[in-house]
Image: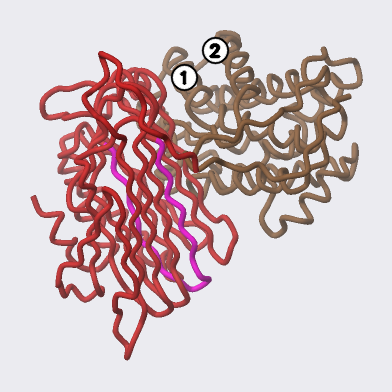
Amino acid sequence: MTLHVMTPIVADEPPRLQRARGYGRVSFRQTDGRTRLEDLVQEGSAKIRLPRVYDGRGPVAVLLNTAGGITGGDHLVYEAGWGPGTSATVTAQAAERIYRRASGVGRVENRLTVGAGAEAFWLPQETIVFDRAGLARTLEVDLAPDARFTGCEMVVMGRTAMGEDVTTLSLTDRWRIRRNGRLVYADALRFHGDTRAILSGGATGRGARAFASVVQVAPDVADRLDAVRDGLEAAIAASNGRLEAGASVFDGLMSVRLIAADGQALRAGMAPLLERLIDGALPRVWAL
Amino acid sequence: MTTATRTTMVTSMADGSAAAEPRCTGDDEDRAPDGAALVRLMTWLSPAFPVGAFTYSHGLEWAIEDGTVTNAASLEAWIGSVLRHGAGRTDAVLLAEAWRATRVRDTLRLTDAADLAFALQPSRERRLEAGAQGKAFVTAVAATWEAPTLSALADDLAPTPVAYAVAVGVAGADHAIPLGALLEAHLTAFVANLVSAAVRAVPLGQTDGQRVIRALTGVVAETAGEARAAAPDDVGGAALRADIASMKHETQYTRLFRS
């Protein structure tokens, strides 16, 4: 990793003296049949809270970026580890905002390791991307052969409720999921330039301003497909044409894609989908 | 013949961008295809080559059912987006990477490209489309024209199939087909196959279909050029509705196509 030193301020640059840096790590181990915190590291703007909650899925770790958003040159790294037999959720305190940058892109690296028989829930809230923002994000997931994983990423282009448009953007969002060391799923979203124009096409977004990817890895994932599809169709029918989604199962994993007219319609589709996939209520921080 | 050598895997920087590295950009890539190369391109990428291309619509059949594609103009828009923002570009980037890795005999780099190309397929039917065509291409080439690197790669990856675009790239490199021509031929075959699917599925005449193919030649050339300038970590796109279309096609009531 290249460490940026403080750069000279030029006149039209936002008034930030220093680029935000953050490194956070949380890991869990199993003791006496219960999942407990093993390790917690917080550096720079990356904070991790562990509220006392009992939702039947083990502890919840809540990520928090104290820089209040991400702009060009920022660099955040989060690592989460699930020891053998553990079950725990990692979520985020709030939507992550990606602000207009003077130069460079913000980098976010999320690395998850899930041990044998463990169940990992990666449920961050949405990422709101503003005009002229830059973000390169990666999600790397390493799963033991029998580990279970449910994860999502949501992206909303601007404050859609206020009619904002994102016409200039550099966004890459990469997923890599390995099971037993083998790459079983990869996704790469890439928006460079006029996002509104890119998403206007019938094969891209047909005017969508928000989208999400959801993946579940589990040995019995195929059994859920019909119910997930029924749930999606109900949400689509209720959305007044503001939501579209599809789901597919292959190689022991389910992939779901959603696109929506705005962030609200996306959340309306995501909440019941995730609750179905995790067999319970969403983390409390998700409540608005 | 290139003089560039590579012995290490393609690595990515912490920021997710590709590491700056020398690329194999010798005469090999830009050379005009000679007669031998043209014969191979026309044979391998012909609809008659036994990979079953005509059975796949890449989600287009659902887009027709859905009313997104109804005529020549909307067909051209759909395929143009898939080229620029979807599998067209992504496949082209990884075809180029596989071609280069084969030319410099970098097995790790080749395996990485092949793994990524298959893992990127977003749905069951797109995995079938990339995997079954790749497998059929490997078998057909091995039985006729032979491509030693491709056969070795298929053995190495089994039971995971070699994605079709990567298989074409490796066979092309084994037979010294220039990369530029290979990319444009591959993308044109992809376009022609989708147009053929549309001609069979919507009231679109043969001539209109040919007009769409001709209209997209510029996008094909741009996509091929962009793919050659890209690193494998630059793959990615925005063809979200095309992905959803392939997922929804799984439950489409009336289907002519396997994808």
| Residue at the disc numbered 2 | B212
Give, as a three-letter code, the residue at label 2.
Val
State the mark number for residue B201: none
On screen, residue B246 above or below A183:
above
Q: Residue at x 29, y 32 (%)?
A: A71
Image coordinates for residue B209, horizontal then vertical, percent: 56, 15
Q: Residue at x 32, y 74 (%)?
A: A87
On screen, residue B176 above or below A271:
above
Q: CA distance from mark 1 to mark 2?
A: 8 Å
Q: Which quadrant would residue B182 be assigned to in this image?
A: top right
Image coordinates for residue A201, horizontal then vertical, percent: 37, 22
Which structural element holds mark 2? helix
Q: Kindly identify which chain the residue marked by label 1 belongs to.
A: B
Is residue A141 part of the magenta span, yes or no? Answer: yes
Give, as a three-letter code, the residue at label 1.
Leu
Q: Residue at x 62, y 14 (%)?
A: B221
What is the tally of numbered marks visible in this picture? 2
Please say whether residue B62 is visible from this viewpoint: no
Q: What chain is the brown one?
A: B
Q: Are marks 1 and 2 in contact (CB under 8 Å)?
A: yes
On screen, residue B35 above or below A237:
above
Q: What chain is the red one?
A: A
Residues rendered magenta in the picture: A136-155
Question: Of helix, strand and loop, which mostly describes the magenta segment?
Answer: strand
Label whose residue precedes the other's in the sequence (1 or 2)? 1
| Residue at the disc numbered 1 | B75
Image coordinates for residue B254, horizontal then vertical, percent: 44, 42
**Residue A47 located left or right of residue B159:** left
Residue A86 or residue B41, whichever sits in front: A86
